[in-house]
Image (spheres, rainbow, N blue to C red):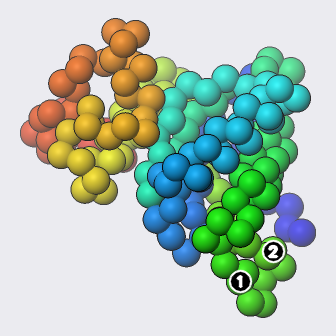
Amino acid sequence: MPNYRRASVPGGSYFFTLVSWKRRPNLTTPAFRTALRAAITAVRRSHPFQIDAWVLLPDHLHCMWTLPPDDADYPRRWSMIKRLTSQALRGADNPVIPGQRRKFGIWQSRYWEHLIRDQKDLNQHLDYLHWNPVKHGHVPRVEDWPYSSFHRYVNEGKYPEAWGDIPPDEKDGRFGE
């Protein structure tokens, strides 16, 4: 198995992008959401981490985590989450993929991670994450997308409810891009 170079900072905050196998639009189905939530809950019991933000789209997800101060092992966490989700969905409209080492096609094998460097970087990635459902044309307004931590951020007063109603090209930024 390849040994990819990844950022590794104990206690760091990371932005992740994971994509479904062949970009199949199955990540927002009730079965997938249930399996993913159960997998995350199970992994957090044995390998704690804080979920800072999340958006789940039909064919990919973005999230931000902060790891415990003495721990940088997010690859293990993602491996466990992906495996547990796949196991829970085995047979639930997930075909066997001929010629593949793995039997079921839920996830692409890799994911993208980015170590958050400072507050500006954090804010840009939060904005990008929360704007993503609008960017991909799933909803006209950020607050219309149900599978996002945006609603929690509004409830906590970190974003105004109408945040994102003005298109990014009419504002001062590109929402993290």
Is there any visible trace of residue 110 in the rendered image?
A: no
The residue where tag 2 is placed is 102
How many numbered marks does the figure carry? Answer: 2
Q: Is residue 147 above or below residue 31?
A: above
Q: Residue furthest bottom?
A: 99
Task: Examine the image and state in which quarter residue 130 appears.
Answer: top left
Q: Quick check: marks 2 and 1 in contact, CB under 8 Å? A: yes
User: Disc 2 on helix, strand or loop?
Assistant: loop
The image quadrant where one finds the N terminus is bottom right
Which is nearer the eye, 17 or 82?
82
Which is nearer the eye, 152 or 30?
30
Task: Examine the image and state in which quarter residue 111 appears.
Answer: bottom right
Q: Is residue 164 above or below residue 5?
A: above
User: Disc 1 on helix, strand or loop?
Assistant: loop
The residue where tag 1 is placed is 97
Which three-letter amino acid code belongs to the residue tagged 1?
Answer: Ile
Q: At 73% from the left edge and 32% from the top edge, which residue is drawn?
A: 41
Label number found at residue 12: none
**Could you say where residue 50 lies in the image, as x and y percent from the top left?**
67, 23
Which three-letter amino acid code belongs to the residue tagged 2?
Answer: Arg
Is there any visible trace of residue 77 in the rendered image?
A: yes
Q: At 83% from the left edge and 26% from the top edge, which residue is drawn?
A: 45
Q: Is residue 144 above or below residue 156?
A: below
